[in-house]
Amino acid sequence: MTQIIPSPDEIYGISRWGRELIAVTDEGEVALCDPANPNTAPISLPGILRDLDQRGIAAPMVLRVRSFLEAEIAKINDSFAQAIARVNYRAPYRGVFPIKVNQQAQVVDRIVEFGRAYDYGLEAGSKPELVIAMAHRLSKDALIVCNGVKDAEFIRLAILSRRLGANTVIVLESPREAETVIEVSRELGLEPLLGVRVKLTHRIGGKWQESSGDRSTFGMNSDQLLRVTDRLREAGLLHCLKLQHSHLGSQVPDIQDVRRAVDEACRYFTALTDEGAPLTHLDLGGGLGVDYTGEKRATENSINYTVNEYCHNVVETVAYAMDEAELDHPVLVTESGRAVTATSSMLIFEALESTLYDAPAAPPPEPDDHHHVADLAAVAGYLVPERVQECWNDARFYRDELRALFRRGAVDLRQMARAEQIYLSLTARIKALVAQMDDRAELEAELQQVADVYHCNFSLFQSLPDVWAIDQLHPIVPLQMLNQAPDRRAILSDITCDSDGKIDQFIVAEGIAPSLPVHSLSEDQPYYFGVFFVGAYQETLGDLHNLFGDTNVVTIDLRADGGFDLLHEQEGDTISEVMSYVEYDPADCVAAFRKMVDEAISDGTVKAGERRALMNAYRDSINGYTYYERHAG
């Protein structure tokens, strides 16, 4: 009988979450689609890796695709433009990118470069981010929006930037901050461009609901807003107040929450205008979500709307509110970061080895073995579809009893080893039998709990911190062999010395699963995984657990002829660089090691001729990559 191989879509749901950016070739390799040239054949991702490997650039790596980044910037700006035309909205859209979402120079530089045609600006939430923003030549109508807690130095720099023609808006977060702005403005003899951050009472759903509502960290309530408005009027600066900032929330899953929050923001806008504030810009902050799972539902890792729907809802809601209040339509500003950068980067790493939780064959019990060993082996004699649940129950019972006996010293190590192999062999047969059954959901879910462990060359804490910290889901698929049926299921473990360094929740075609369908590893070819949509926050939030540093980073651009151009390479951290981050001087470490080697030679425990090999090995390591190097040395 010919085996029917499920399609990659039937296993991983790629077309559901891939946003027409990810495809699979006839050869079973994951490929990248050029959004600017949809008729061009997708380019194989393993093919890109082979090309980069020949250039000396190896995984693990973050692969950035400029074409994807440009497509998302265009999508948001074009969608707002279409909504403005459709609703007959009488003001433009001026988006800003929050630098905190991805502060890497190659990302920010390309956002500014491509966004210039849309008067796209930047949002700075700290002094370093303002310094970055001011180093970029934005278009004359683009904004620099300054959020967060600001000291006098921050405010001084923002006000002075106005002398260079920058539209730098200082968003007031508190009455105290307003006093600092007034003082610095008087000291400089220059007027600021001001905004106020309004704390909305509407609370969104989803993972980041704490960032919304009246218990959110930033922004002012009604009383504080009035105090600031009155103080600015008293100081002769109320005419400088041009922007209202109202953060809708982060990764808002439900479009109804978007509408309600925007409507409340408009109410504050009209009320502040009635108080004499000459507002011209309405900044609705972040909130535009990314559908990581492709479910198209209002869940923590999905959204129930499209970019077009989001833009239309925002524009329509503001237009109705302003028309009802008989006010001019304000310039619309959003601070979409996740939606701009998430899809543009992927983490790629190799599976190094596997720990398998089944076995192809079972050893026979020995005559002197405990009777439970024979009982366990006997399960194979009645392993048929009708009794498969019974067999699974019995296998676990006898295995657990034998483990208890081993702990008490009643079973020796060799008996325990035979029992474990018998159990693993039964598990393999039970898995194969269940895979052929129609009614298998409950038992299959139990079997997924004994999935294999694929040990992979990456650090969860460095490259996927949100996966560890807040259970963020990212699409993960093997990059090759997708024209073959997966024969195993696995969780992915990183190479840190930490039991938390694993991924055990995956997006598959049926939904969310505790293990990922994978293929058996081969000795003669690498097996790569891709973690997609990691361009937002993951590069910024990573830490140095076990002193694993940044991976190699590569930026490519997809060509219309089906090839790619290597635009930029950033080598990953060396061990010496990571050591310096935690206050070690690599030169001091080399000197200390050299002293120990020389002392060992004096003691006679090391031969003088071994000194060079020891020193070279130490120097090679300290200058090497922090990750596993298959061809090191």
Image (tube, rainbow, N blue to C red):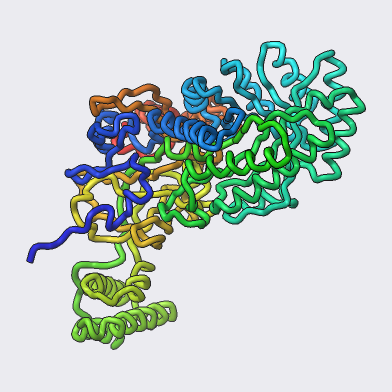
Q: Nearer the viewer, residue 492 or 484?
A: 484
Q: Nearer the viewer, residue 232 or 360?
A: 232
Which quadrant, please, contains the N terminus? bottom left
Instruction: Name above or below for residue 344 compared with residue 399.
Output: above
Instruction: Name above or below for residue 23 compared with residue 608.
Output: below
Q: Residue furthest top?
A: 164
Q: Nearer the viewer, residue 461 or 632?
A: 461
Q: Nearer the viewer, residue 352 or 273?
A: 273
Left/right placement of residue 332 relative to residue 437 reads: right
Q: Looking at the image, can residue 47 be seen?
A: yes
Residue drawn at (67%, 13%), measured in percent from left and top? Answer: 165
Q: Looking at the image, can residue 600 be seen?
A: no
Residue drawn at (60%, 56%), measured in percent from left and top? Answer: 205
Could you say where residue 207 lies in the image, as x and y percent from the top left?
Answer: 58, 54
Q: Residue furthest right?
A: 234
Place residue 95 in its image quadrant: top right
Could you say where residue 91 lies in the image, as x and y percent from the top left?
Answer: 61, 28
Could you say where residue 223 lies in the image, as x and y percent from the top left?
Answer: 86, 44
> What is the tally of numbered marks visible in this picture?
0
Left/right placement of residue 239 relative to residue 310 reads: right
Q: Residue furthest left?
A: 1
Place residue 287 in its image quadrant: top right
Instruction: Name above or below for residue 377 compared with residue 289.
Output: below
